[in-house]
Image (cartoon, helix red, strand yellow):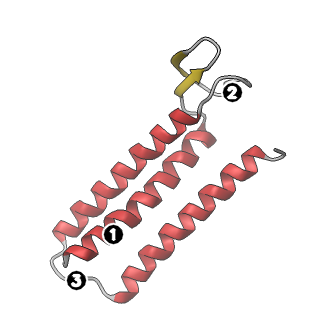
Amino acid sequence: MPLWQRIYLAACCAVIGFAFAYSLAEYAGWARVAYDPIERTIYLARPPLGRLPLGYLGLVAWGAGGALVGAAAASITAALLRRPLGERWMRLMGGWALTAAALGGMFQTWNLWPF
């Protein structure tokens, strides 16, 4: 498999992993790192966090972990496959990455409604 295909697959799977982990952490109510700007403390908390603590750092950390897992899985799979992937598979992976990003964004927008 050419190097550019390995990089493309890893990037697509990283986007999918980020969107999946970021949304699942919010949906499942996983504990996350929170920052309280008034007390200037960083702590681990489960949702609901309240109005003041910022849980965004924890969500981004979950998303980054999902991106790392997705990219690692794609890299291992690409290393095991010796032959190049066809154009159809490359478009399919790109479509899944765009779909995952769009669905993750829509889920987060729905959670914030009404602003």
Q: How crowded is mark 2: few (under 14 residues within 10 Å), some or many (20 or more)?
A: few
Chain-order first, disc 2 or disc 3 = 2
- Residue 30 x %, y %: 55, 33
- The residues bearing labels 1 and 3 have C-alpha atoms spaced at a distance of 12 Å
Name the element at disc 2.
Answer: loop
Residue at image mark 2: 48
Residue found farthest to the bottom: 87
Q: Residues within 10 Å of mark 1 (few under 14, many from 20)?
A: many
Q: In which quarter of the image is residue 49?
A: top right
Q: Residue 9 carries which label?
A: 1
- Residue 60 x %, y %: 50, 41
Q: Residues within 10 Å of mark 3 (few under 14, many from 20)?
A: few
Question: What residue type is disc 3 on?
Answer: Pro
Chain-order first, disc 1 or disc 3 = 1
Residue at image mark 3: 84
Question: What residue type is disc 2 on?
Answer: Pro
- The residues bearing labels 2 and 1 have C-alpha atoms spaced at a distance of 36 Å
Chain-order first, disc 2 or disc 1 = 1
> Residue drawn at (22%, 83%), measured in percent from left and top?
84
In the picture shown, does residue 95 fall above or below 42? below
- Residue 53 x %, y %: 65, 23
Q: Residue 44 carries which label?
A: none
Between 112 and 80, the one lying in front of the other is 112
